[in-house]
Image: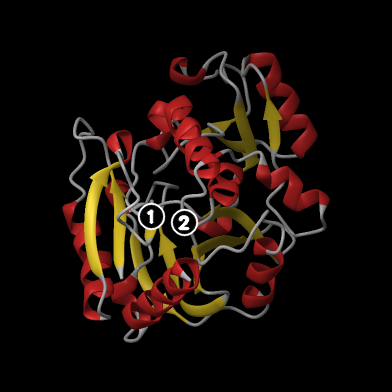
Amino acid sequence: MHLLLLTPDPAFPEPFAWAFHVEAEALRAAGAEVASRPWTAVGDVSPFDLVLPLVAWGYHLRYAEWLALLDRFEAEATPVINPPAVLRWNSDKAYLAGLGAAGVPTVPTLEVDHLNEAALAAAFRTLGTDEVVVKPPVSAGASGTFRLREGEGAHVPMEVHGERMMIQPFLPSISGTGEYSLILFGGEISHCVVKRPKAGDFRVQPNFGGETVACEPPAGAVELARAALAQAPAEAVYARVDMVVGIDGALQIIELELIEPALFLHCAEQAKPRFAAAIISTAERASK
């Protein structure tokens, strides 16, 4: 079984080898051969049984190229996991509106074509809050994400002024309870972690000082995760479903990570073999 893991463009500034090696070694331990290529220079993939964009960091920075790659994979019927239709759907956070429309409890989300002070003021009114988080619809790692308060002088940061943006109410539970991440392989729950920001911040990512610990899924979390994933255009073989406690005290989806998620394989004893088994069984089916 010969697998290709897509990695960042060589010019991408962040080190990625640690993430690649964790996933590659889990797959090798299960008997697979694993190679890597930058997602920006994929080349001929016919020697591989399966292509996995598990470390395709930076796709949001070269988005048109990313979409073109997905189009190519579909046109050539390349075995890719997750499937190109899922990768495309998950690349733009507009999918959150679809989840909400389908009745999946989701953090209320507004989309504005051009974020400015008038649009920000309207968002405060519509969402019924005095504090919001704005984020680009195509982004990763909290890049371009800001927490803004209502009041005199409330302004849009220059970095995102005039840009298409998503606006959500800030949820105090993120600073307290934290953000839950459920990791599923082959549609089955593998493990759960909770991520909390450092004091005074709202971003849970490690590069902003956030911490992550293993935990049991809260009540209703597994069912919510499956309901959200059921809205994807095809099955997600690997998935991370992020959820938070909403203003009403119920769990709400804040994001689905189906492209290059941190899977926190170190947080559960059997996570690595479960991950590898789901990938390899998919590759075996694809090669028949």
Which quarter of the figure has residue 197? bottom left
Residue 35 appearing in the image: yes
| Of pointers 1 and 2, the one earlier in the residue sequence | 1
Residue 8 location (% of width, % of height): 27, 41
Residue 66 location (% of width, % of height): 44, 34
Residue at image position (38%, 55%) is: 51
Which quarter of the figure has residue 12? top left
Q: Are marks 1 and 2 in contact (CB under 8 Å)?
A: yes
Mark seen at residue 239: none
Q: Amino acid at mark 1?
A: Val
Q: Amino acid at mark 2?
A: Pro
Residue 201 location (% of width, % of height): 40, 46
Q: Residue furthest bottom?
A: 269
Residue 228 location (% of width, % of height): 68, 62
158 horizontally vs 23: left or right: right
Residue at image position (53%, 74%) is: 186
Q: Secondary structure at mark 2?
A: loop
Residue 209 appearing in the image: no
Q: Secondary structure at mark 1?
A: strand
**Is residue 271 placed above or below 174 in the rendered structure?**
below
Q: Quadrant of the N terminus?
A: bottom left
10 Å crowding of disc 1: few (<14), some (14-19), many (20+)? many
Residue where numbered disc 1 is placed: 51
Q: Alpha carbon of mark 1 to alpha carbon of mark 2: how far?
A: 6 Å
Mark seen at residue 79: 2
